[in-house]
Amino acid sequence: MLASSSPSAAGRSPELAASAELHENLSSIAPGPAIRPGAVASLPTWLRSRRRQLALAATALLLVAVGVLCSELVRIRDELEAGANALDSLELTEVEENGGLAATADDAADHLDEADRIAHESPLLRALSVVPGLDGQVDGLRSLTESLVDLGAEGRRAGAELEAAIDGLDGGGAGRLALVDTADEVLARLQQAVDRTQIDDRFFLPPLAGARDDLREELDDKAIELTDASRATALLSGLLTGPRRYLIAVGNNAEMRSLGAITATGVVNIDNGELAVGPFLGNLDTALVREGVPVPTEYTDLYGWRGGMFRYPGTVYTPNFPQSAQIIAALTARNVHGPVDGVIYVDTITLKAILEVVGPVTVEGRTYAAEDVVEQLLYRNYLEFQTISDHVERKSLQSEIATAAFDALNIRDYSVFELAESLSVMARSRHFLGWSSDPAENELWQRIGADGHLEPDDVLVEVGNLGSSKLDFFVTVEAELTTEPGDYERRATLAVTITNPEREETSPYIEGVSGLIEQPGEHVGWLLFFLPQYARSITAVDFPGFGAAGPDGPLFASGVVVRIPVGESRTYTISFDLPILENALTILPAARIRPTAWTIDGVGPFPDYFPQSFDLDEGEYSEDDRTLEEPAVTPP
């Protein structure tokens, strides 16, 4: 986005400030005969007065000329800003809101064309183009707008071609591949157009200088985005051409790990752009019995007791998705599904997002829409099928809904922009993740932010469900981090409060069937604190200690089993030290239905919909997405 130039001094408009600045510059180099000291004082009074009047008149004329120039520059600046803003809005759903890809590209090109028209056809600029000292401003301005007109024309052409390809998409595999090929060609031309666009560094008056600088920054950003998009398009082409077999792992947000526990899995076969989704199976059909798959030692030390080497649900206690995905792929190679090329994780929140794009689906005479699918699958479903004996029928229904949603993606007409934006949001919030065994293809998941890798400054609070209950539909989590800087270290305290509210209507399946449950209605969880590995002296403050602790990728995990009676809250506090120079932490989303509410050094609470970077020195967030999303579901 471009920002308007601000006044150079209080009470001055940009035009007057620019006029004064230019007048000072011109005065300092104004030609004329040298006057010996004392000569002016020896002139007659009337002559000195006349010289002053002429000087004032010349200055006034100069100020008027510069003011006229500045007024035209402001008009051009406004058009350039509008054009740049339109280019910046070439983003997925914003394109839809602005009338389509072609309309958005046309709007950008129209503003750039208008800026160029003013630069070349304005009578005022024509007159000023012959004024010494101002002619360079006009020439530079025209050179700038001419360059941007060429870019706008290429953008207009690209928008029309892509929208035509999207409108002509027939939903079949050949159509998908043709669309990707068109996108690849268009992106290559846009990249060349951006590379050809030259923005020089000559001096411009402030109304234009700021716009020029912002345009240069915008073009630099677009060059990077186009390079990334071109690479992603090439990778997507390879993926869709196939043949590929991906496991689709469906997560249940009513039974949490670091993600929703995997409760159903199916295989999608991709070949020549066609997507064929096989039946979804429950964990009883896919679990290994006698011998598990090999897992890393650090995984065994932390999570081995949860059976991730035998069954899918235990694989996602770690938030390190590249590691859990490799274990999932190893399990799949040994079970009824057979070997796969990669893993795609989607949870119920992602199914909701898909239905928002493709529309409702009907299963066994009942319609499931985006508005109610979360509550139906994660709550009402368990009221209808109340006991463990109803397990097979309930799993069958969930699998059929997932199959219907993916079939709709394959055959229905919908906005690819809206789908891409929805999946992008889901990836950022850790509801949609992907991994490929091919390192080059895995780069595609990395580029769209869906690979689920961890960074050294990440922090996550996880409350894993140990009771095989579905209480995470109700349970809420709050986290309060306070820090106190010292000379060399920053002492930190993290207090996590878990609330297990009463339910007006429930069932045995919702309350849980695990032998770990000691009291009816209690929530049995595994509270895991994930901190940077540079955190030191991690200590349990108000509970006896940790049941497991150790490294997990770039982070260090410390866990304790917790029990929260129904209708009550419990708080668990730890303390630790951070190096004083490590002043930034990133809070990762816990991917819960009801987001974890974070407060850091008195700032908050904010929901963890998306990763949030917090500057401990400044006491503020470096990026604020707190208002972008509403809760996925309201309490029943």
Image (tube, rainbow, N blue to C red):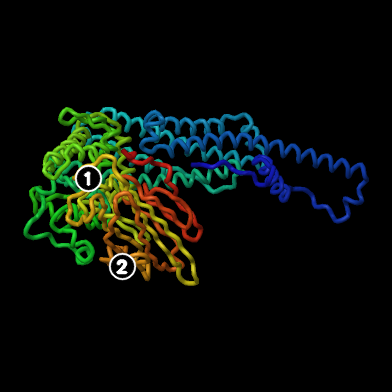
Q: Residue at x 49, y 57 (%)?
A: 619
Q: Is residue 243 left or right of residue 155?
A: left
Residue 375, given in percent of the width and then of the height, sits at: 27, 38
Residue 51 is drawn in which quadrant?
A: top right
Callout 2 secondary element: loop
443 or 238, which lies in front?
Answer: 443
Residue 545 circle label: 2
> Disc count in the image?
2
For disc 1, the marked residue is 510
Position of residue 149 relative to residue 389, above or below, is: above
- Labels 1 and 2 touching (C-beta < 8 A): no
Q: Quadrant of the C terminus?
A: top left
Callout 1 secondary element: helix
404 or 169, which lies in front?
Answer: 404
* Amino acid at pointer 2: Gly
Residue 108 circle label: none
Residue 291, given in percent of the width and then of the height, sits at: 8, 60
Residue 52, given in percent of the width and then of the height, sits at: 84, 43
Position of residue 63 relative to residue 587, above or below, is: above
Res 421 seen here = no
* Amino acid at pointer 1: Ile
Q: Is residue 255 left or right of residue 200?
A: left
Q: Residue at x 19, y 47 (%)?
A: 249
Res 213 seen here = yes
Position of residue 346 relative to residue 494, above or below, is: above
Q: Residue furthest front?
A: 519
Q: Is residue 374 left or right of residue 55?
A: left
**Real-space Cα separation, disc 1 to disc 2, in angstroms:** 29 Å
Q: Is residue 480 left or right of residue 502?
A: right
